[in-house]
Amino acid sequence: MGYEIRSLFQGETKRLLWLMGIMLTVIVAFQYFELPYDHVLSSVFSTGKVPAPAVENNSLVTGGLESKSEIASDTVNGLNSTGTHNVQEMANDTRTSKAEDANLQADFDDGKDILEEPTNEKLEGLNKNSTVDTVQNPGNVPGPEKGRESEQSFIQRNDIMGGDSGGVGLSPIPVSPVMDLSSNITLQGANISTPITIDSNSSSTDKDATPALDKIEKPAQSSLNTLGENSSGVDVPKENKKPEIPTPAVITIAEMKNMLLQNRASYRSMRPRWSSAVDQEMLYARSQIENAPLLKNDHELYAPLYRNVSRFKRSYELMEETLKVYVYKEGQRPILHEPVLKGIYASEGWFMKQLEANKQFVTKDSRKAHLFYLPFSSRMLEETLYVQNSHSHKNLIQYLRNYVNLISSKHNFWNRTEGADHFLVACHDWAPAETRIIMANCIRALCNSDVKEGFVFGKDVSLPETYVLSPQNPLRAIGGKPASQRSILAFFAGRMHGYLRPILLHHWENKDPDMKIFGQMPMVKGKGKGKGKGKRKGKMDYIQHMKSSKYCICAKGYEVNSPRVVEAIFYECIPVIISDNFVPPFFEILNWESFAVFVLEKDIPNLKNILLSISEKRYRKMQTMVKKVQQHFLWHPQPVKYDIFHMILHSIWYNRVFLARAR
């Protein structure tokens, strides 16, 4: 009897196990065909954890998903799947990445001239009906010049330098989470909130074309782990590959504001290796700025021009009272300590000259210094070391690497923060790529301030690109006609640098009498007798057009930055910026939409309608704002309060205050 019961029990158990096995097989098979592969087992196990494939640390991957903070901390280079904009790099990407994009420049090298239309941008009002078809040399539009190579392609090649002997290993800069930037942007008619980014590399005298570099394959992994003999750098930890975070093709001004606020809240530079009294002074300054008293009716500052005039005023006062800068004496001319004061790269030269001569801010006692200045000229670096047609910038990067090794071995200032309290001021187009690794932790004041090419909100500073005609008299010919006497609706003239300007001329050159859109200025013969008769007066004609126009078109050239932005303000013309992903100067301080118009590149066909939608009352108010903001963009033989020298220094100070950490 007992044997029969046992047999019956065993039979029932086997049937039950068979039934459970069949059910489990059906469930797994169903999920295999119905669910994404990486979720097949995650829903079966209650913990959501399954053994992951062999990873360096043999850890578990939770449900095939990663937290937002994990994803945000990873910096990846994104390729634009459409090939439209040659390169799409994550905003705020500042560390070495594992490149899988060896053909980043393929479209450019093939001569393709494509204007990308962002998929997530939906503009109401006028912009709703404004579209631009993808342009590939439309009609009789001349193709783009193969001038200077984009900064992104430099990054491809220059990352190879990371493992050179004598290299300084830098700890990666933390990147704040990338937020969802797909929100719709609304054109607010008269308020001119049309988000437009324009980039122009040519001014009244266009930049000389810089030799293009051939595309070079990027190695599978850039190495920054090799330290120089005298370097106290920290090895870059190996990172597990994480999913790419897609970023929009175009980041609008409104989205840039959000990114700035987000980085302010989340981004911090590395903790100092040892304490210093200046750290507490910076923390005190931050507290004072955050709790600044409300400013009312200041006779020097017009509140609508600023994001927060009270904070700016208090921060500027603290800078004047507190800030001390140590300027390194090491280094030889002409690359170091030799400012260039004329031309389109003059901003870096004028700043160098005026800071090195300044007795208020410069200190010889490094213990009192809040900031350390690296006094090199990106323009002279290129002129001195670049070998024409070499298609290589390795020697330029190696020069900067050797310079950092020199100062970090001779002094301990760099090593205390890995360069986080150091800053550079560089206006050449190549500066972002050349400084992106070895000076990644530094505060970089850059003319080429492109969100897609490593500009870090809250750390880096957008440097105004100023075209100085006369170093002896930088204010020569300032000003323009009153608003009521400006008869030209919009004006542009310049060489066909980059892909955008041919598109602009295709739609507007000789198409409308109100739109004075040219390539190079037409030849204008001189008037009168004698030597002047019959001579070309194109340059003066350019200036007179700016002085007589309501809106000055600042269209990008090879890179996003353009001296036309400051030129327009100089001649009291409202700048119309057409340069997607360009961060305008002093972005953390100024409310640019109060005195400038931003037009998306895709909205060029609707340019006139956008400008005409601005009421006369609104135009006159904006033109008044241009005249009020002008003081922040002027060089003086001797610096004056609130001028461009002090504004550059303040933006660097302001960012450092909000990045500072105590030991």
Image: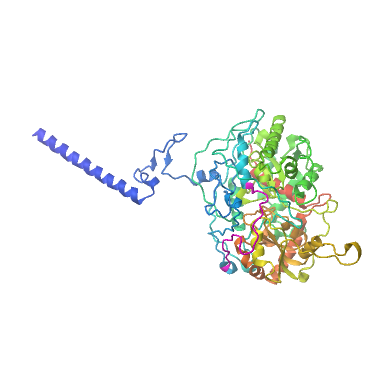
Residue at figure coordinates x 83%, y 57% from the top left: 476
Magenta segment main secondary structure: loop
Q: In the rendered picture of this protein, how many numbered marks are placed on residues? A: 0
Mark yes or no: residue 276 visible: no
Residue sitting nearer the eye, 120 or 431: 431
Q: In this view, does 277 lie to the left or right of 101?
A: right
Residue sitting nearer the eye, 70 or 453: 453
Residue sitting nearer the eye, 655 or 604: 604
Residue 146 location in percent, x, y?
Answer: 66, 52
Residue at figure coordinates x 75%, y 53% from the top left: 466
Q: Relative to 363, does residue 514 appear above or below in the rendering?
A: below
Q: In this view, does 59 lie to the left or right of 274?
A: left
Quarter placement of the N terminus? top left
Residue 503 falls in image quadrant: bottom right
Q: Is residue 307 left or right of residue 21?
A: right
Instruction: Please provide the residue range marked out in magenta.
Output: 129-151
Residue 310 location in percent, x, y?
Answer: 70, 54
